[in-house]
Image: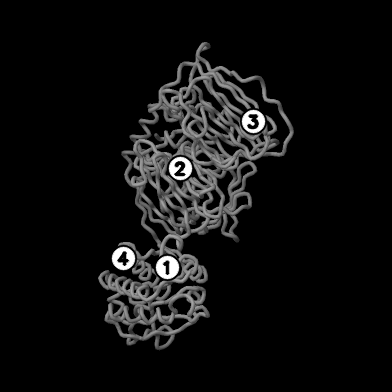
Amino acid sequence: MKIKTLALSALFIAALAGRLQAAADVKLKLVYDGRNHEYSAPPITLIINGRPADGLKMPPIIMDGSTLVPARDVFEQLGASVSWNAEAQAVEVTKAERVISLKINETQARVDGAAVSMSIPPKIINDKTMIPLRFVADNLGFLVNWDGERRAVYIDDVSDVSALGDKSDLAKEDAPPPAPASADLAPKDASAGEIKAETHPDANITGLQTPGVTDNTYKIIADGPVSKVTKNLLGDNRMYIDIYGAALLLGTSGSPIENDPNVISVRVAQNQTSPEKIVRAVFELRGGTEYYISLSEDRKIITVGFSHANPVLGADNAEPAAPAPLPSYPQVSGVLSHIGYDYENRRVYIEKTSGLSAADLAENDDYLSLRYELTLPGDFSAYFGQGRYAIGDSYLSGVTIEARGGKTVVTMNEARILAYNLSEDERNIYVKPVLPKEKYPRIVVIDPGHGAEAPGTMGNGLIEREVNLDVAQRLHSLIESGGKIKVYSTRLTDVNPGLEERGVFGTNYGDLFVSIHNNYAEVSPGVANTEVRGTETYYYPHDNDNTIGISSEAAAGIMQTALVSGLGSYDRQVRTNSYVVLMKAQVPAVLCELGFFSNPEEAAKLASSEYRDKCAAALYDGILKIFAQYSPRR
């Protein structure tokens, strides 16, 4: 089920859909990172608080699966202030007391001073500061939803109940309509009086649990005792709860609820931050519902319960079996059910439904972004909900569940690169994170040299960073297809990791490090030496060479023989050099110079797809032969 947060009329929706479907692709010439780029994609419509955004000097664009928008044009329409620090090359977006600072081309932002990772960095594109929409909106407390069919992004400011007044139609196409709000069918408050106020330090609201996780109630969870809780019933079947002295820890959330006779939808947002922090939870109720609100003895759990039986418990109203162990106060942002984290066994559990099994899950290990995704074969939002489960141990920072392209995607947000073991029993699918070296007996790290602002050598129409990456990608595919060795790369796109970072990456995650480069020779500065040709392999001797299974010198000799044999190139022998990537890699490490761009004959070969395939095959052969003589000692 798609989540819509705007009560637009059917006529407006139809007109908007027609306009979007009829629109041709947006074709743009984009200038960023010092290069020209061609962009062609269907247009994206931005809806801000129910109205199409206007005055955008640069349209929203999709880059690496994320939506980038012009910072000032969009977020000032949402009441935020936007400022630019030219010296730091950073944009700052402020709303109420929340400050987000983003530096151009860096994937680490600052949210109220704390470092937070993003999947894509902000960029200067066509002289406009373009920033990741969802990251900034989520952290400012806005509600963001994506309608893939209409290619529309909806941004809602739900910071006060008036903003919700004309937005109560949350994806009701598939849900039973609520009963009319007549006097005899209006919801009724059956609470045992008001909740007594006390004085406590501010607390964080860390989650909302729905029926199916515990019992036939909704639970709003805090990490400390809350001072004051009030409730109000509005005339349109909406009930809201205000929690005073509370901060919403993990961002605004909202979701429709299916198969519940009492609740249509729930929204949770930071209502205000001064002079007092207030979190507001808005429940859209069905007519005739009797509800009660209570506060636990330790004042950490606000329970919203109902007199009606909930059909998710089964036709005979039997209690469900107890879920896998949960921490005392799990941090849940959004509305989640049937999924959680077993801290004792360090694994995520996913309760099965509709014949779901581990074999149905499609895996995508986006390890360089510290994201591991499991895509379920359909939209299971009605069963699992959508939101984020914060974990915060040394392996996982959290788990995100979202609907994407008609399917439910479960994302493990990693604290470091991990591998995973999937298992199942009759009731649950288990996803257990482990260290890569705990799972794979042999791991090679490929390092495509240079990248982005570091082009490497250039000659005869070739740019080294591009050739290195292309050959590395072909090699990566060969290793994965072979299935004998696990492979990681220091980069998969045109970026430039630091030299030390590359070597350390090889040490942390690999048993063998292979850096791919190409060469260039000059007879004098600026004058190419067109005669020099051939292949050479470098290594750097380490003190631990005799203790890790094979020395870097021996590995370089094996690799050089494989390259010369596979390419038919001139043998420039094995050499030693104190390259930083080799010095920092504490595993067997080699740096391969495949050929010379300055030599027209070799440059012509390296320009061809067929020869690059030969390079990848020769490198793969060298890796296999190294591991044939090398059992990693970890």
Residue name at image x 43 percent, y 64 percent: 491
CA gap between label 2 and label 4 equals 32 Å
Q: Earlier in the sequence, mark 2 or mark 4?
A: 2
Cα distance in 3D space between marks 4 and 3: 58 Å
Q: What amino acid type is highlighted by mark number 1?
A: Val
Answer with left or right where residue 203 lies relative to residue 566: right
Vertical side of 89 occupied by 554: above or below = below
- Mark 3 residue crowding within 10 angstroms, few (<14) / some (14–19) / many (20+): few
- The residue wearing badge 2 is 401
| Viewer-side residue, 149 vs 440 | 440
Q: CA distance from mark 2 to mark 1?
A: 30 Å
The residue at 55%/34% (across/down) is 268
In the picture of the structure, the residue carrying the numbered disc 3 is: 296
Judging from the image, what secondary structure is the residue with disc 2 in?
strand
* Residue 523 screen position, x and y as percent: 40, 88
Q: Residue at x 70, y 33 (%)?
A: 227
Residue 550 occupies quadrant: bottom left
Q: Residue at x 44, y 33 (%)?
A: 4
Q: Give the mark nearer the N terminus: 1 vs 4.
A: 1
Residue at the left extreme? 610
